Amino acid sequence: MAANIQDKENFLGILWLFKERYGFKQLPSDMAYEAYLKSLLICANGDGTLTDEERNWVIGYGCAYNCNPAIIEQLKVYKADEDIEAVISGDFAASDSRHFLIYDAMHACSADGEYSEEERSVVLKGAKKLGISEDTFKEIEQIYLETVQLHEKLLAVMFPNGAPL
């Protein structure tokens, strides 16, 4: 992963993102990126339809966190039909991030403008497969819903006339 970063400032920026969002003290490996991002696509495809918006959300997410371009190219054509437990277990850092995976999967599933009941059922099924209880899933989902509402409120206050760009 670090070899993919062009210079010290980019490295510091990506590390800052991981600390800010996940509390990480170092950058994940390419294996962790691949396992995590593929697992997100598997969740988004759980309803049988992986929309362009959902795929693009996951790819954009990977790009924002400086994922290796070779992995990004794989994600563009990835069928997202593998067993999620087998994929996420491919790397310890990705595997240890299962709760965040479910949270991020909710974001990915709603990238097409909707977090449908079908998608919710699929993400819940994925959570159970990953050893996450339904009660914990509901807690994660509540945080997700509150975060979405808070973000919308933040944007409305900060940009009362709409985003400038």
Image: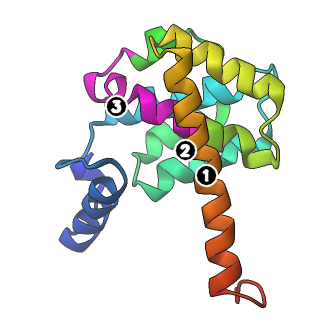
Please report the bounds of the magenta region as a residue range. 89-105
Between 1 and 130, the one nearer to me in the picture:
130
Determine whether the residue tagged by mark 2 lies in a helix, strand or loop.
helix
Between 44 and 31, the one nearer to me in the picture:
44
Which residue lies under the disc numbered 3?
Answer: 32
Going by the numbered disc 2, the residue's amino acid type is Ile
Question: In the picture shown, does residue 113 fall above or below 99?
Answer: below
Quarter of the figure that contains the C terminus: bottom right
Numbered disc in front, either 3 or 2: 2
In the displayed structure, does residue 141 sit left or right of residue 50? left
Residue 139 spot, x, y in % from top left: 53, 33
Going by the numbered disc 1, the residue's amino acid type is Glu
Dot 1 or dot 3: first in sequence order is: 3
Task: Answer whether residue 97 is magenta in the image.
Answer: yes
Q: Residue at x 69, y 67 (%)?
A: 152
Dot 3 or dot 2: first in sequence order is: 3
Q: Residue at x 47, y 58 (%)?
A: 64
Which residue lies under the disc numbered 2?
Answer: 143
Say how many tags the image has.
3
Going by the numbered disc 3, the residue's amino acid type is Ala
The disc placed on residue 146 is 1
Determine whether the residue tagged by mark 1 lies in a helix, strand or loop.
helix
